[in-house]
Image (cartoon, rainbow, N blue to C red):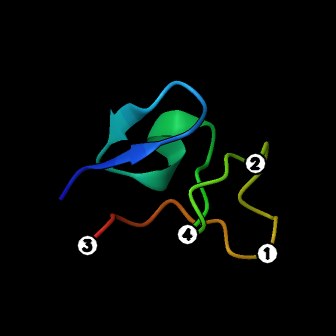
Amino acid sequence: GHVPCGKDGRKCGYHADCCNCCLSGICKPSTSWTGCSTSTFD
């Protein structure tokens, strides 16, 4: 599904769709950050 993500509340189907949004909903600059992923949101 899609969830609001990031400062601008964009809808994202994938974490990478909004600057690698992490599970916490915080955008990080790289998927190498702990908790970041390019997998789909459930």
Residue indicated by mark 1: 34
> Which comes sooner in the sequence, label 4 or label 2?
4
Residue 23 got which mark? 4
Q: Quadrant of the C terminus?
A: bottom left
Tell me if 16 is positioned left or right of 34 in this view: left
Q: Secondary structure at mark 4?
A: loop
Identify the residue under disc 2: 28
Q: Are marks 1 and 2 in contact (CB under 8 Å)?
A: no
Q: CA distance from mark 1 to mark 2?
A: 10 Å
Give the Cα distance between marks 4 and 2. 10 Å
Packing grade of label 4 (10 A; few <14, some 14-19, many >=20) is: some
The answer to whether residue 10 is above or below residue 2 is: above
- Residue name at image x 52 percent, y 36 percent: 18
Q: Which mark is residue 42?
A: 3
- Going by the numbered disc 1, the residue's amino acid type is Thr
Q: Residues within 10 Å of mark 1 (few under 14, many from 20)?
A: few
Tag 3 secondary structure: loop
